[in-house]
Amino acid sequence: VFTREGCCSDPYDFCFVIFLQEVEKWNTKTCAEYVDSDANWMSRNCLTWVLGDKEFEASAATDILDTGLARCFRVEVTTPKRSWSWGVCTPKTCSGHDVEKDLRTFVDLNRLTLNAVRGSTMTVRVKELVSWSALGGVFDFVVAGFVNSGTSTLVSTLSAHPKVFLESGELSVPQDPLPVME
């Protein structure tokens, strides 16, 4: 029997496999039905990770996104005294707005913040994560580099050519294994 107590000890335990099997069923229902069901604990207890957990992000979360069966989000919660960031995966029918609206269903705030958010005013930001493979058709060419490594000069020089069009401005990419969908 698949239970909360029996899963979630590491990124590749059977919880992950069962989520991928179960999520197909939940993708045929609304997010509200998932939130109201007994299955919502999978997102809260099994597929929530502290951002920066490179092992989970590079393994389980990336695999979930690559299957295309589920969505993952970056959740940032800020109180007047502190801020926290997590990742959470949900069925495809759940949006960032759903995660924000039903935040305590998707993220166990009391456990993860040691009750620091209880009674506090908080600001919540939710952004969708995507796998790098999902960006395959988005870019034809990328100029990437470290600060002060000459990338702006290279872009400026290439843009001067009449047959080259490059987006203006710089894109700040977080140092996370999973990019954020803007």
Image: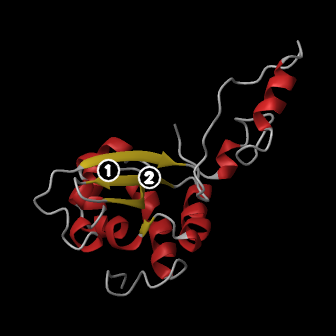
Q: Point out the image quarter for the N terminus.
A: bottom left
Crowding around mark 2 (Cα neighbors within 10 Å: few <14, some 14 to 19, many 20+) is: many
| Relative image position of residue 88 (x, y in whole percent) | 41, 60
Query: Which numbered dot is residue 73?
Result: 2
Q: Nearer the viewer, residue 72 or 152?
A: 152
Crowding around mark 1 (Cα neighbors within 10 Å: few <14, some 14 to 19, many 20+) is: many
| Relative image position of residue 170 (x, y in whole percent) | 65, 33
Whether residue 30 appears in this view of the structure is no
Give the alpha-carbon distance from disc 1 to disc 2, as whole Å. Answer: 8 Å
Query: Which numbered dot is residue 163?
Result: none
Residue located farthest toward the top when viewing the structure as drawn: 162
Along the horizontal axis of the image, is 54 left or right of 118?
A: right
Q: Where is residue 161, by image quadrant?
A: top right
Q: Helix, strand, or loop for circle 1? A: helix
Q: Where is residue 107, by image quadrant?
A: bottom left
Q: Where is residue 140, by image quadrant?
A: top right
Whether residue 21 appears in this view of the structure is yes
Residue drawn at x 70%, y 35% as measured from the top left: 138
Q: Amino acid at mark 1?
A: Val
Query: Which numbered dot is residue 99?
Result: 1
Q: Are marks 1 and 2 in contact (CB under 8 Å)?
A: yes
Q: Taking 172 as reference, is 163 above or below it?
A: above
